[in-house]
Image (spheres, rainbow, N blue to C red):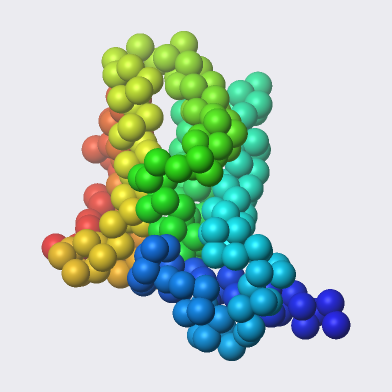
Amino acid sequence: MEQEKLATKNKVIETALSLFKTNGYQGTSVRDISKKANVNIATISYYFKGKQGLLEHIIVDFLEGYVAILNKYSLVFESKKADSVLIDLVEEVLNYNFHKKEYASIFYRELTLDSVFIREIMMTYLARERYTFIQIYDALRLNNTNITVPFSVFFVQLKSFLSTPYLFPSYMNEVLYIQQNDTYFFDRYKEYVEKWIFSLLGIDTHNLTELKMYS
């Protein structure tokens, strides 16, 4: 019985992910979700207390996993250099976003809106994000005089690398002809982000294997 309930709950979540991503949150109704998931509207209300609760569940689930990654790298400077911490953290976050791309797309889209829920997210989960990256940035500046950009610029650039493929999925598909599930693109993308980090740190990349994106 418990397995059936879990399967039903997961089916509702997967359906909502698909519809929110395709039609947007405002363009999706509870009736749309119940029809496609083949469940009663009352079932959605029981598990999530409606469409807003379902959206919040999806975003919080995504952020819990993200913060778990951040926590792994917050206090490891005694055993690893800050540049290694940054590269490892960014790679793990990119992997996480790629494997939860539907969650990431919905989260980054909702983050552009002003709502009570998003403000709460900013005061909790995203405050933790900022704290982790400030730790890394300060450690980098302490040991590397090549970094001249202020934290705000560093963070905006880094966040753009992490979020852009999921914030503009239609643009990626229709204009750049890049599919989100394209592992070739994703592998090359990770290499280019790493190369940007090397450039930021003033590390010579001439001896690295040349990186090639789509031509």
Q: Position of residue 123 (x, y in %)?
A: 55, 31
Q: Tell me the quadrant of the picture where the N terminus can be found.
A: bottom right
Q: Is residue 131 above or below residue 207?
A: above
Left or right: residue 74 versus residue 96 is right
Q: Position of residue 128 (x, y in %)?
A: 58, 31
Left or right: residue 187 versus residue 11 is left
The answer to which quarter of the image holds residue 173 is bottom left
* Residue found farthest to the right: 1
Of 177 and 45, the residue lying toward us:
45
Residue 88 in view: no
Left or right: residue 130 versus residue 208 is right
Q: Position of residue 141 (x, y in %)?
A: 42, 14
Q: Position of residue 171 (x, y in %)?
A: 22, 62
Q: Is residue 54 above or below residue 158?
A: below
The answer to which quarter of the image holds residue 46 is bottom right
Q: Tell me the quadrant of the picture where the C terminus can be found.
A: bottom left
Residue at 49%, 36% in the rendered image: 119
Q: Is residue 30 above or below residue 149?
A: below
Left or right: residue 215 versus residue 170 is left
Residue 116 in view: yes
Residue at 35%, 23% in the rendered image: 152
Of 193 and 202, the residue lying toward us:
193
Residue at 39%, 63% in the rendered image: 26
Residue at 60%, 51% in the rendered image: 60
